[in-house]
Image (cartoon, coloured by chain):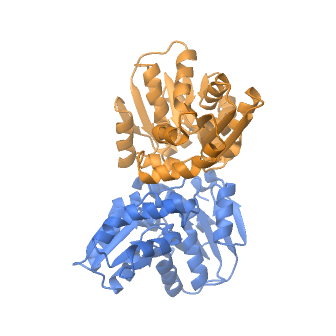
Chain colours: A blue, B orange
Amino acid sequence: MIGVFDSGIGGLTVVRELRRFLPGKALVYFGDTARTPYGNKSAETVRRFAVEDAAYVLGQGATTLVVACNTMSAVAVDAIRQRFPSVPLFEVIAPAVDAVAARRAKRIGVIGTRATIGSGVYGQRIRERLPKAKVIERACPLLVPLVEEGMFDAAETKRVIRRYLEPLKHQTVDTLVLGCTHYPFLKDAISHKMGKSCAVIDSASVTAKAVAAQAGKLADGPLTLHFSDLSPHTEELARAWVPEADAINHVPVERVERGG
Amino acid sequence: MIGVFDSGIGGLTVVRELRRFLPGKALVYFGDTARTPYGNKSAETVRRFAVEDAAYVLGQGATTLVVACNTMSAVAVDAIRQRFPSVPLFEVIAPAVDAVAARRAKRIGVIGTRATIGSGVYGQRIRERLPKAKVIERACPLLVPLVEEGMFDAAETKRVIRRYLEPLKHQTVDTLVLGCTHYPFLKDAISHKMGKSCAVIDSASVTAKAVAAQAGKLADGPLTLHFSDLSPHTEELARAWVPEADAINHVPVERVERGG
């Protein structure tokens, strides 16, 4: 069973893409909505929460882990691997870096939360693969709350996107990495702003493709979503974004803290 | 010693006002930045976190509690009182309702987080005091992230304020309650939008006045700020907003969960 986890609801974009590439496979999703967002928190706190989240989906029967969150992928993957060394683990950064490298991009923009961008992980890994590339990273902390309000096409959202992306456009980036699993909901507005000469790489989609290609045999089964806090707003968003979910459950955060 | 606590950094507006009305008094502040924001979480989760936060500031030597958060004031005050029945406790809703009642307001707008507005607590308590008043409540979930970005005067912020407040202005409210401790940072922009015929009641300020009037004898002493997650961004905001703080400390969230 695939176990996908995220700091909240953003990782549901990865679930949607996994269903597209791996239809009918058993999948459990955990969103840590009681402690969301992780993106403005310190690396130490994110690592502790990440290990607890992984333990929770493993406790639900997952055999393959997918970290559907750039912040955790940036700072907590080693901690998860150390704790669960025998479990296959996918994260969202490596597939995006692979896609950038395959394009032989020259001027690359990366957008994400403050924690992801502050880690510098995208710049570092892209330069390892493309030493001559120029990488411009930019934190866009308001995009997550705008997505969580469902304001995908609002004038305010376009204005915030313009504020964040104008400097990247000025630097004529040829490739832009959406380094946050919330951002695929804004892909149209972002692509429109960047123009046709800029390719937009969506980490949710490239990650799902990588899992489908490399995860081996997976069992068919239900798709269940678990949240550490299930407010009416969260439930409404989850139903709208993943209508094929077989169940939406609330798991008290103290159970997650105790390790599932 | 006064113990002030909030889900994050918004309650620092109450600290600022307390310093104005009670200069030099010993004060400990706890901001639960590891689990912020509370405003989109369920009442059950908010209650559990609130009791832990109160226990933490009591463990630091506080003798009077100030809940500097409308979300906790709306849903968790009874839970805190049940757990610590002998400790004097102030919250931010009663002083704001008193101020509305004193004005004999007729058409009252209340803005706050989704949790505060969803609780309906302001409408209920205002109608108890002013049975003929019309109360219009509106959740404004984007204002907290905009304040936390320090975008007090940005064009985007003005646009979001317009979106949220236009319906209240249309209903010609005579009094607007800022039912979230983050909002005083936006008071100028909000007052400007609402116009001169609308009084704006700032819950941080009226709460500090109530504490100063009713708390009795308090000892002089240092002002210390504690956060369950201390990212560079949080530290920078805390220093800018409360420059007179004697210390800014990080307390691991697991200590708060264990009860201080």
Q: Nearer the viewer, residue B197 or B234?
A: B197
Give x and y (percent) for residue B151: 41, 48
Looking at the image, is A100 positioned above or below residue A141?
below
Give x and y (percent) for residue B233: 37, 48
* Residue A51 visible, this angle: no
Looking at the image, is A250 positioned above or below residue A66?
above
* Quadrant of the rendered image containing residue A75: bottom left
Number of numbered discs visible in the structure rendering: 0
- For the point 67% across and 29% down, which residue is it? B105
Q: Nearer the viewer, residue A229 or A3?
A: A229
- For the point 25% across and 77% down, which residue is it? A133
Looking at the image, is A33 positioned above or below residue B199?
below
* Residue A31 visible, this angle: yes
Residue lying farthest to the left in this orientation: A132
Give x and y (percent) for residue B148: 44, 47
Give x and y (percent) for residue B8: 49, 42
Q: Nearer the viewer, residue B202 or B72?
A: B202
Looking at the image, is A257 positioned above or below residue B18?
below
* Quadrant of the rendered image containing residue A228: bottom right
- For the point 35% across and 63% down, which residue is it? A138
Q: Nearer the viewer, residue A228 or B69?
A: B69
